[in-house]
Image: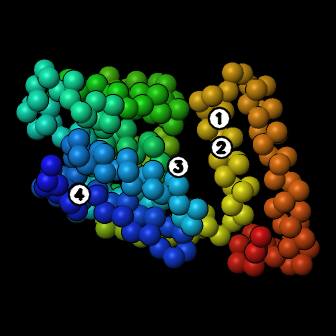
Amino acid sequence: MADNEPEAVQVHKSSDGITTITINREHRRNAIDGPTARKLTDAFLVFENDPTQKVCVFYGAHGTFCAGFDIHEVAQYGHGFRDSSYKGSIIDDRLELSVLGDIRVAEETAVFGVFCRRFGVPLIDGGAVRLQAVVGLGRALDMILTGRGVSTEEALHMGLANRVVPKGQALAEATNIARQLLAVPQACMNTDRTSCYYSAYNARSFEDALSNEFNEGIKVINTESVRGASEFSNGAGRHGSFEKAKI
């Protein structure tokens, strides 16, 4: 079958290890249809399996991150849609995409919301699960049940947005954060990141979360931590600086 939108998902890899994945469907305000969902899946799998790429920036071109799932496609397939080849790869709301990120950068004009509420489209790609882990059950229910829009000011206050920047500056700020992440010892950072996610989604108890954090963290002590202590003794990282640390 011919690809009618070969540029719907664009991927750029930098030499320093930053992959930028961009949704590029201006005519649909970056809404996600089935083919675009598959392209996004492929792009993220390539990133995950490329050892030279360490951080991914996920971005929406043309001033919109994502308008959610492409409702035009739902209308086209009607009742038969649930049995189509797109089952299992449907992204039904922009919010579900945003809460996949570790750090969310929003432009000051952005609005967050479960806007699919208006059209009877449910959250089926982890939005209800991840949103409450990010902002808490009460705030998640407020957004999910009402479908109301949340400004960047409120999103920043509740932790849904981590940074708010002027219009047109989101990609630059996200790329700057990516470079900051590359500047720190990678094994230690990723171990702590994994511990956070284990605690949020997989831990059977508080004690289990603590045990996992210790057991995974101790593996880093004899590698990066020892080298890091040596670098600190030699003057690296003093006074909060990241410039001299080479671990």
Residue drawn 14% across the image and 23% down it: 80
Q: Is residue 110 above or below residue 86?
A: below
Question: Which amino acid, mark 1?
Answer: Tyr
Q: Earlier in the sequence, mark 1 or mark 3?
A: 3
Is 157 placed left or right of 65 in the picture? Answer: right
Q: Is residue 108 above or below residue 140?
A: below
**Which quadrant of the structure image shows residue 4?**
bottom left
Tags 2 and 1 in contact by the CB under 8 Å rule? Answer: yes
Residue 147 can be seen, yes or no: no
Q: Earlier in the sequence, mark 4 or mark 2?
A: 4
Q: CA distance from mark 1 to mark 3?
A: 14 Å
Expressed as whole percent of the image width and height from the top left, the position of residue 9 reads 28, 58
Q: Which residue matches tag 2?
A: 194
* Residue 8 tag number: 4
Q: CA distance from mark 3 to mark 2?
A: 11 Å
- Is disc 4 placed on a helix, strand or loop? loop
